[in-house]
Amino acid sequence: MEDALSSFHETASLHRRIADHLREAEAFEGVGEVYQVLERPDEAVKFHRQAVTGYRAAHDRWRLASGLHRLAAALDASGEEERARGHWREALSAAAEFSDPKAVRLREEITARIGDNAAPEHTAPVPGPDHASARFGHGRRWRSERDV
């Protein structure tokens, strides 16, 4: 796990130097996930927040939804249930524009975490882009398996 942390930190630093802030945010999200696996949710929260900030700046709604979900899970694991619920609600809103099966699963998972009565009305699948086409529409050349 230490190798993974080191690699993600190095990747974030590299992408910061070349001003690829979206990839930097993805690296921060990776660091947060490793800290979650290590059961260190407070550290995970810090890096998921940085990832979410990057996704907001890039106007990447799919990654924002996914990042908010991960941030909420880390907050929930650290005992901050109410703050987690707020981020899950925002994640539902961000994911609402996507209609592909992965987006539907994300919304279902989030709704299960916060309870059906807490979900905003617009969380049902709506016609629109799937998350993959929204991502590929940004002109990026490379995608990892995790992105698809």
Image (cartoon, rainbow, N blue to C red):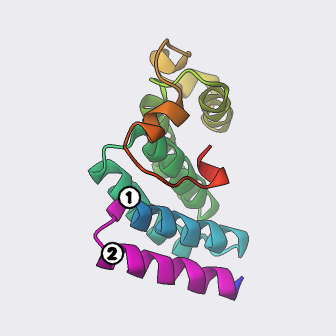
Q: Front-most of 69 and 31?
A: 31
Q: How many C-alpha atoms fall within 10 Å of the one at disc 2: few (<14), some, or many (≥20)?
A: some
Helix, strand or loop: magenta stretch: helix
Q: How many C-alpha atoms fall within 10 Å of the one at disc 1: few (<14), some, or many (≥20)?
A: many
Q: Amino acid at mark 2?
A: Arg
The quarter of the picture where residue 103 lies is: top right
Q: Front-most of 100 and 67?
A: 100
Residue 82 visible somewhere in the drawing: no
Could you say whether the residue bearing mark 2 is in a helix, strand or loop?
A: helix
Residue 22, disc? 1
Residue 28: % across, % down: 48, 69
- Where the N terminus falls, by quadrant? bottom right
Residue 16, disc? 2
Would residue 34 be counted in the magenta stretch? no
Would residue 11 be counted in the magenta stretch? yes
Residue 135: % across, % down: 46, 40
Residue 6: % across, % down: 58, 86
Q: Which region is colored magenta?
A: 3-22
Picture layout, residue 4 above or below residue 28: below
Q: Amino acid at mark 1?
A: Leu
Distance from disc 1 to disc 2, alpha carbons, whole Å, reads 9 Å
Q: Residue at x 64, y 52 (%)?
A: 146
Picture layout, residue 44 above or below residue 96: below
- Where the C terminus falls, by quadrant? top right
Q: Front-most of 14 and 115?
A: 14
